[in-house]
Each structure stands twice: as structure tokens, then as C-alpha cells.
Amino acid sequence: MSIFKKPLSIRLKIAIIVLLNIATLIVVVYVVSNTILSKSYLQIEQDQTVLNIQRVNDAIEGIATELTVKLTDWAYWDDTYEFMVDQNEDYRDSNLEDIALFNLNVNSMVFVSPDNEIIFKKAIDLESVEEVSSEDIANHILTNKKLTAHVDDSSFVEGIIMLPDGPEIISSRPVLSTERTGPIHGTLIFTKPINDKAIKALSDLTHLSIQLYDFNSSSLPNDVVEAKTSLAKGEDEYFTNPLSDDSIAGYQILKDVYGSPALIMKIDRPRDVFSQGQVTLYLFVIIAGVMVTLFG
């Protein structure tokens, strides 16, 4: 018994061909659109992440500049100039109490003679306003001559240093008279810790989630290790990494005053641009699909 298959009608064949063409065209539109639009939105997202990293950098530099401004008032002052010579008690009693550092919002101050000997040092806990050990900062200063190698009134050092208790912002100026005349009577140094409170203040100021990691730590998160490996090559100043569909992170190495890597800064933010790009892409494909279908 033979079975005869009824041939497809011309109308059905045309319909199938049209549907296949429509499906193929929609897929092509989606692939091309996804490639072009996604790449554009990803670039915008990366540019915004880098811009946010730079904002945090500017905020940190602002803290260092503010510290230097406070230091300048003290370093270029006749009373300080005389104290470096005679270490008089009046200056100590009037200016070097714990509350003086607290009012300055300074963690420590160190007076160093021209012979690189420490004349006076003091450090306080800015939370409790109580004196704490200043040995770490003193030892760091004595073993790093760059901090006290000043030659004129325009000389200064400011930036990040790493201490056993964590990173600090440091500022150093030569001690001169109020008129900025010499000879230089040594060096005055202020420091301010980069602790959890300082990081939170930076986050509040920039409206960003900020984390700082010790560059030399052996227990870094995997994403920070990846960023460190990439940045350590020196090819790029910034590294961006989409952590998920909802957040993207940016990273940068922060160097200390000696030019060595000290910290890895990480910021993360919601992927608003990427999400909007995906919505735009889907709407475009849907509209294109409807138009192609109507055309078919």
C-alpha cells in the first residue's frame, strides 16, 4: 500500500519562508544590536567608574592639602621657631596639650631638629582624646630622611605612609619664622590616620562605597588580587571589573610618599548604566521584531 504525501501549498511554503526570514532577521538584529549597544554602554560604565575613582583620589588629596595648610601655620611661626631652639615650657603648655591635637584633627605631631633628632613628639586617639604611643611614627621618621630633607620655604612632603597600625596621611614642612626666613630650624610633621572613620567620611563625601587594602597583604579578596595583578603590570592606571549584573568595581593602586605601592583602593557602585542599556536593547529588539513581522 503506497502512502502519498500531500505536497505543501504554495501559500504555506511562502508563509514558512517568510517566518524563517523574519526569525533570522530578528536574531541578526539582536546580535548586532547587542554587540554595538552593549559595548557602548559598557564603555560608558567603565568611564563613569574611572571618574568615581578620580573623585575619591581628589578627596584624599584634599585631606592631605588641608593637613598641610594647618601644618604651615604652625611651621612658619615665630613661637615654633623659638621652641625648636630652646624647647621652652610656655610653648609646651600653651600649644602641645592633647586637646590641641584634637582641635587640629591631627593624630600626631613630631618636631625634628636639623640634626635629625626628635625634640618633641605626641600622638593621640582622636576618638578618646587620650595620648597613645608615638614610637611608630617617630621610628618611621628617623629611618626615612626624605621626610626631613627640606632646603627652603617652598619644600614640603605630603602623602601616604604605612605604619604597623595602618596607613596615615603625613605632611612635613621646614620650621621657619613667621616671615618664612631662615635658617631652617628643623622639621615639623603632622599625621592623620586613614582608619574606618576616615574611610566612612570619604564614602559619605563621595557617595561611594570605598574600601582600602594593604598592597602587601597576603589575604586579599579574589577580586582585589585580580586587580592587583593587572595593575602591577603598569600598563593601566585603573582596573574595572563587573562583579555581577548589579554591581561594578573599580580599583587603583595608591602609592606612598616614597613612590612605592601602599594601598589598593576599591570602589563599587550599582550598574545603573548597564541595566538601562539592557532595557534599551530589549525594547529595540522588540520594536524591530514587531516591525519586521508586520513587514513580513
Image (cartoon, rainbow, N blue to C red):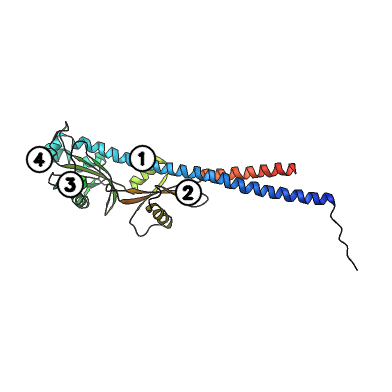
Check whether the beta carbons of the residues at disc 3 and disc 1 lie within 8 A of each other: no
Q: According to the image, label 3 marks what residue? A: 121
Q: Earlier in the sequence, mark 2 or mark 4?
A: 4
Q: Using residue 191 as the reference point, say whether residue 30 is left or right of it.
A: right
For marks 3 and 1, give the CA distance.
30 Å
Q: According to the image, label 1 marks what residue? A: 58
In the image, which is nearer the foreground, mark 3 or mark 1?
Answer: 1
Q: According to the image, label 4 marks what residue? A: 85
Whole-percent x, y for residue 270 in the image: 49, 46
For marks 4 and 3, give the CA distance.
15 Å
Q: Earlier in the sequence, mark 1 or mark 4?
A: 1
For marks 3 and 2, give the CA distance.
43 Å
- For mark 1, give the secondary structure: helix
**Residue at x-position 12% and y-position 39%:** 83
Whole-percent x, y for residue 200 in the image: 37, 45
Crowding at mark 4 (Cα within 10 Å: few <14, some 14-19, many 20+): few
Q: Using residue 129 as the reference point, say whether residue 239 is left or right of it.
A: right
On the question of residue 88 being in view, the answer is no
Whole-percent x, y for residue 258 in the image: 27, 48
**Residue at x-position 29% and y-position 41%:** 64
Label 4 is placed on what type of residue?
Answer: Val
Label 3 is placed on what type of residue?
Answer: Lys
